[in-house]
Image: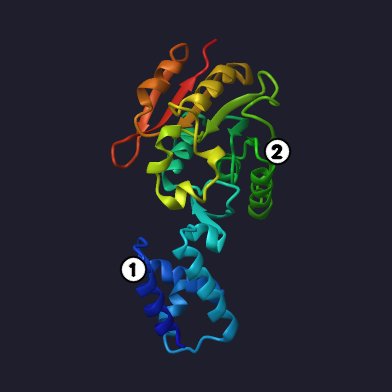
Amino acid sequence: MTIQTALLQGNKLLEEAGIAVPRLTAEVLLAHALGCERPYLYAHPEEELAHNPWLHYGRYLHERLEGKPTQYVIGRQEFYGREFRVTPAVLIPRPETEHVVEEALRVGAGARRVLDIGTGSGALAVTLALETGAEAWATDISSAAAAVAAQNASRLGARVGIVVCDVTDAIAADSMDLIVANPPYVPEPQREGLQREVRDWEPPIALFAGETGLDIYARIVADAPRVLKPGGWLIMELGFGTLNAVTRLLSAWADVQAEPDLAGIPRVIAARRSG
């Protein structure tokens, strides 16, 4: 079995199963099995696969055909130009969440202490620690997620204090200049309508937020004024269609502003603590 033949067979299996971008997926899985980068596959198409890489490739294909996201199969995902370890204990970082980083760099420039609520893989906390040099803290209710975030922070050389708690329960008053969050925002009634890769594999606690999807937004907005220093900023990712409801939650805040993603959809909301 050569690399070229393995790619053709993998692509065929994935395509017949209706898996998105089958060719790219086959390349990523085979490169992972071989421990190489994707360009190597095209530079060595006639190379014979050894027994172990072939077995690993077959297992990876099977897992993907069962619905397991590619990121969980290979154990990593890029975010803001850095590679983060991911497991089913954490939400897979999305490109859209990079807008939270960009907004934080814009309105929170000069922040000396930053908090990431519901950190998951640590993507936001680690990125902001490295991009700004600020003292970064992160919370997550899941100890398994906190362990993944700690590994990512250590591997990428970011100093992040990680606390296992619910939202901001363990964070001291008037201690933060900037809070960021990509909270759960999928309404529970929409569970069955999600892609199986999301519904069946990603952690429900990082996805669902009650009947309306607003439960965690409401809790963050309610306690953030206690945690933030006067004039500090709160920045949150927005779920589709949540802009008006979240804006109402922030009615007592100053300088409330929403920023769209590249498709023009409101993606991030920022607000400043008054006083």
Whether the residues at callouts 1 and 2 have beta carbons within 8 Å, the answer is: no
**Residue 19 percent across, percent down from the top left:** 37, 62
Name the mark on residue 86: none
Residue 151 in the image: above or below residue 159: below
In this rendering, does residue 36 appear at all? Answer: no
Mark with earlier residue (1, 2): 1
Q: Position of residue 225 (x, y in %)?
A: 58, 16
Residue for point 54% across, 58% down? 72
State whether residue 138 is above or below residue 244. below
Q: Residue furthest left?
A: 264
Which residue is at the front of the view, 36 or 32?
A: 32
Give the residue at mark 2.
Answer: 161
Q: Where, quadrant-wise, is the C terminus in this rendering?
A: top right
Identify the disc placed on residue 15: 1
- The answer to whether residue 68 shows anywhere in this view is yes
Residue at image position (67%, 46%) is: 144
Amino acid on which disc 1 is placed? Glu
Q: CA distance from mark 1 to mark 2?
A: 43 Å
